[in-house]
Amino acid sequence: MLTVMRIRTIGYFVREALKSLNRNSWMVLASVGTVAVSLIIVGVSLITVMNATYLATRLESNVEIIAYMKTEVNEEEALALKKEINKIPGIAKLQFINKDQALQEFRRELGDQKNMVDALGGQNPLPHLFKISAIAPEDVEKVAGALEKMKQMEKVDYGKNVVDKLFAITKWVRLVGIVVIVLLGLAAVFLIATTIRLTVFARRKEIQIMKILGATDWFIRWPFLMEGIVLGFTGAIIAVVIVDLSYVTATDYVRENLNLGLFGLQTDPHFLMALGAAMLGVGTFIGALGSSISIRRFLKV
Amino acid sequence: MSKNIITVYLRGVIFLMINMINVSKVYPNGSKALTDITLRIEKGEFVFLVGPSGAGKSTLTKLIFREEQPTRGQLLFHGKNIARYKPREIPFLRRAIGVIFQDFKLLPNKTVSENVAFALEVIEASGREIKKSVPEALELVGLSNKADAMPAQLSGGEQQRVAIARAIVNNPPLVIADEPTGNLDPDTSWEIVHLLQEINKCGTTVLMATHAKEIVDGMRKRVIALEKGRVARDEERGAYGYED
Ligand SMILES: Nc1ncnc2c1ncn2[C@@H]1O[C@H](COP(=O)(O)OP(=O)(O)O)[C@@H](O)[C@H]1O
Ligand SMILES: [Mg+2]
């Protein structure tokens, strides 16, 4: 009884599935569209969460405080202040960076666009600055507060605010994303189930004849399952194409037009590939689930 | 003694196509379609099943290809109790039985030869088998020249021939026909019955439920008469025996 599925049998299933897809074109459009839209939202949310997480970890790994001095403060005054700063409790490392070093570092970070610095024509608009690491992350805020009180300081920057904000955003994106995805996913499953139900109904006479002719239950079920899978998979392909194209366009735009340096978008091809594969997998699963529901409920074999 | 039991058993397997023992069928709505039916049909027989409308003829045929299950009693097919078939074995029971209906049950969007090929497709026959068997079956029913026609383009008699070709294309040992001539004029009915007789001559057992008195009386085959769900008569070379 364990016969390998014949090629012509598989051909038969595919043919039958395509035929009935052709018949219910409005339902097909609705279900493929819903799968596509829900997967696009899945894709966009995942990309957002991934990028935010990636950014957050990059920022968090250097939770150091940077204290920019006022431009009128000269190097001696700054070095004198170093002793002062060292008295603040909770400091692990204190490094003075004079404005020339700072400019060099900035040039390095700019990479291709370092000619922007050359355009300054030998002028250095940067202030002297201190890089400070706290002993413990909890100390960062206290140390930063103490630094801010010093009148020589222009600005005290530390990553924590940004990280906190990022985490708040990712949490929000995740929550809204999950709710929307679940709702749209249910709608997609429901629409596919309805499409398959229409097919089962349109072909009830044929199903009855197949049973009398001795078709096995699975032989009867396969074309319906295939139909759902085709619906889900097609929706997923549309979503993958849209998400990937717009993401690539977005990353290109960000790289070329917004000079964010450290804050650029993640452009890992493996990430995009894994995301695409996941979306196709989810789409196929939605299709199979939708048709299984209708097969169970309406295909009495 | 034990030898005798074995003989009885082997006889059942070797000669008996159908063996019904005290079979009753009560539908879920309480209607008693069959009561205490006991009958045997041997391999190679041609049997008419007659009786007025509502006598239980269709129900009896449905029990054999397990569209319905008996409420009581045993129904043995080739010596095997069909109640014992597991759900996944039922398709294989049905492949041994060709069924023909009054309303033909052809697929309107398939050609004649596609309709016949469908019977082989659903049992996953090979392409070679389909190419060989379909023209043979159409030849047997005399429709080789209509292979590419659609069912709607055929007369009732021709449509029933297609249905017969579909029923026998995989050489089942048993053919069940439930009022196959119910929608046909007398001449066409005779053609259909003669075709079934030809099929029977090739060794296929035929069970035909019918209303057609003329045909039953003219054929002089075994007649099982049902009345109100019971066997009223069972005669070799019988006649219809009702005035209805
Ligand atoms: N699916 C069903 N549900 C309930 N009652 C049925 C069903 N099929 C047949 N019957 C009843 O069983 C009896 C026998 O019907 P049937 O076997 O169709 O007789 P026949 O084919 O001889 O006309 C009738 O009283 C009919 O109403
Ligand atoms: Mg009937």
Image: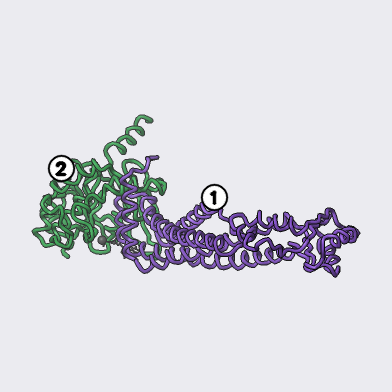
Q: How far apart are marks 2 and 1 (CA)?
A: 70 Å
Residue A49 in the image: state x and y as whole percent. Answer: 61, 61
A74 left or right of A276?
right
Residue A136 in the image: state x and y as whole percent. Answer: 82, 56
Nearest the camera: A235 or B183? A235
Q: Which amino acid does label 1 sit on?
A: His
- Do we see residue A131 in this rendering? yes
Vertical placement of residue B130 versus A113, above or below: above
Residue A218 in the image: state x and y as whole percent. Answer: 39, 50
Q: Which amino acid does label 2 sit on?
A: Lys
| Residue A257, picture quadrant | bottom right
Residue at figure coordinates x 14%, y 60% from the top left: B154
Local packing at callout 1 (Cα closer than 10 Å; few below 14, some 14-19, many 20+) is: few
The kind of secondary structure element at disc 1 is helix
Task: Pinpoint the chain carrying mark 1.
Answer: A
Image quadrant occupied by the N terminus of chain A: top left
Residue B128 in the image: state x and y as whole percent. Answer: 23, 41
Task: Pinpoint the chain carrying mark 2.
Answer: B
Nearest the camera: A33 or B176? A33
Q: Which residue lies furthest to the front in this view?
A: A121
The kind of secondary structure element at disc 2 is helix
Residue at figure coordinates x 28%, y 54% from the top left: B61
Residue at figure coordinates x 34%, y 66% from the top left: A24
- Do we see residue A39 in this rendering? no
Q: In the rendering, what colour is chain A?
A: purple
Nearest the camera: A36 or B35? A36
A130 left or right of B2?
right
Residue placed under numbered mark 1 in the picture: A270
Local packing at callout 2 (Cα closer than 10 Å; few below 14, some 14-19, many 20+) is: some
- Chain in green, by letter, is B
A99 left or right of A260?
right
Residue placed under numbered mark 2 in the picture: B201
